[in-house]
Amino acid sequence: MFVIATAGHVDHGKSTLVRALTGMEPDRWAEERHRGMTIDLGFAWTTLDDEHMTAFVDVPGHQRFVTNMLAGVGPVSAVLFVIAADEGWRRQSAEHLAALQALGVRHGVLVVTRCDLADPGPAIEQARERLRDTGLAGMPAVAVSAASGRGLAALRAALRELTRALPAPRPGPARLWVDRTFTVRGSGTVVTGTLGSGTIAVGDELVLEPAGRTVQVRGLQSLKTKVERAEAVSRLAVNLRGLGANEVRRGHALVQPGAFAQVATLDVRLVRHPDRLPSHLVLHVGSAAVPVRLRMLGPHAARLTLTTALPLHMGERGLLRDPGAQHIVAGIVILDTMPPQLHARGDARRRATQLTGMSDRPDAVADIARRGAVRREALVTAGVLAHEAEVPADVVAVGEWLVAPALWKTWVSALSAAVDEWAAANPLSLGLAPGAAAGRAGITDLRLIGALMADAGLVLGSGAVRRKDAKIRFPEPVRRALDVIRARLREDPFAAPSAKELTRHRLSRQHLAAAVNAGLLCRLAPDVYLLPDAPAEAAHRLAGIDQPFTVSQARIAWGTSRRVAVPLLEYLDNQGTTRRTGNTHRLSGSPYCSWAFPP
């Protein structure tokens, strides 16, 4: 299917032309037919060849209904531009052309109507001049008279050629901008719109934005024919399950879950705009019209803050309209839906320079290079990376993160330097805690540190990021004191030195903690230290006594005091080597070991 919108000044015969082409009445309201003027969007369709159906979105031409016109032309990529032979180019002809330019519409047919009332030649030449520097320059022109039927065959032929030349729909997830909503008895709420990308099928779950509400497709019709599945580009009527008609309106959108972010702030390139722009405008995208606040960043770059977030992708086009003066002031190309904050002096100027160098079409590699590091999901919902697309070869991918090679190298270098600097300043420490290491190196997410450590030649040991050969460097007096204590413990494994003895040897808590990290001592409790192999020896001795046993029996087996026995048993409990049975007794060994449960 192809979808074409009309455009042109009021009363130049757009609806009459659609009626003559399709045999259908595009004006839906009795008031429109009574007044002979289109007020809201109308819809009609016909077959231009044996294969494809062509649908027309008939838009109003009066200035008061420009918002309705923009809602109809917004999602459409081709236009039937209409001017009357007896009136020529008029004010709304110019405004409709400005809208089409802003939206990047480059395909269409120029139709000069009422050629039975005046020579169409002057009107065609006048239109050609107005179109000369636009994307619609050179589109074919056809003179017609809907009243007599003159030129309709030529127009049909031109429309067939137009549809054959239209580019394939841009690949992407499903999004349907709602342009009409109503209720059908027995079916519930129905919305209509142009499906510009993706596929919708009966039974699909979609998200209604900006409400963020999940809805289910109960039924589909395309041009009043029931279908199970529809692909872009299509005119669709979508029956939604469990949604009231008052909960959805024009400007809302049905989107594929997980494919669009709700965007409230965006950076844009301004197209065809005056030197000065008001700060409060209305943004038109798709069928939506949302008030925005504009902040100029540079001659052709601006930041828009939306009063209502919209499901938008980078690279999309829209236009800005002044609601006071009631005219279009600029077109926009969305360059960034995740713009950085601007706080420091000069941020806006630097941002404008960056935006000036950005392409109108999203580029994943360039976007990742610009951001440094970004989650894959963020690029998908921004329209930069397709959900199923492979990660570009020259990007570092770690989990959900995509990182520019230059930033990755910077992180590796910074992490290595942070660990070395810490080691030089802290001889009693094996290394940095992972969180501290990530913070010092400026790493975005702690979950990246494992891969960065591998590239930096670092390891994680004893809860610290360090060099593989890192060792704690004790001052000589501390080393001698530890040697004395360790020698005594080798002779009597459970004779833990007292707090006074540790103080006498001038061993601070920092020294003792470093000894534990270095594998020289094992800490059972504050001021209770044994050799690292003492728990294994303790378990071996307990296996040789009667089961179950008390603290006193364990103390006797170890030849130590209660000061040591109690924390040692608690340590063994935590290791699963011993377990309590009752309030006063324990069993030695795992509950799954057969020797702990004799028959």
Image: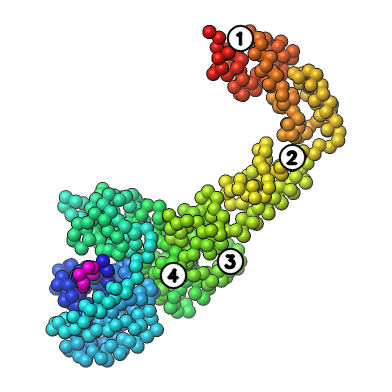
Q: How many marks?
A: 4
Three-letter amino acid code at disc 4? Val
The residue singled out by tag 4 in the image is 333
Q: Nearer the viewer, mark 4 or mark 3?
A: 4
Alpha carbon separation for disc pair 3 and 2 = 41 Å
Q: Viewer-proximal residue, 277 or 539?
A: 539
Residue 347, labelled with which disc? Answer: 3
Q: Earlier in the sequence, mark 4 or mark 3?
A: 4
Alpha carbon separation for disc pair 2 and 1 = 42 Å
Q: Which color scheme is applied?
A: rainbow
Position of 457 relative to 116 (above/below): above
The residue singled out by tag 2 in the image is 429
Q: Earlier in the sequence, mark 3 or mark 2?
A: 3
* Location of the N terminus (image quadrant): bottom left
Residue 7, labelled with which disc? Answer: none
Q: Residues within 10 Å of mark 2 (few under 14, many from 20)?
A: many
Identify the secondary structure beneath mark 2.
loop
Task: Measuring from the top left, give residue 42's x and y in whole percent.
Answer: 22, 69
The residue singled out by tag 1 in the image is 547
Alpha carbon separation for disc pair 1 and 3 = 74 Å
Task: Measuring from the top left, give residue 352's x and y in whole percent.
Answer: 54, 70
**Chief secondary structure of the magenta portion:** loop
The structure residue drawn at horizontal position 67% and vertical position 43%, both measured from the top left corner, is 459
Position of 229 relative to 275 (above/below): above
Span shown in magenta: 48-54
Three-letter amino acid code at disc 2? Ser
Q: Residues within 10 Å of mark 1 (few under 14, many from 20)?
A: some
The structure residue drawn at horizontal position 45% and vertical position 68%, both measured from the top left corner, is 361
Q: Earlier in the sequence, mark 1 or mark 3?
A: 3
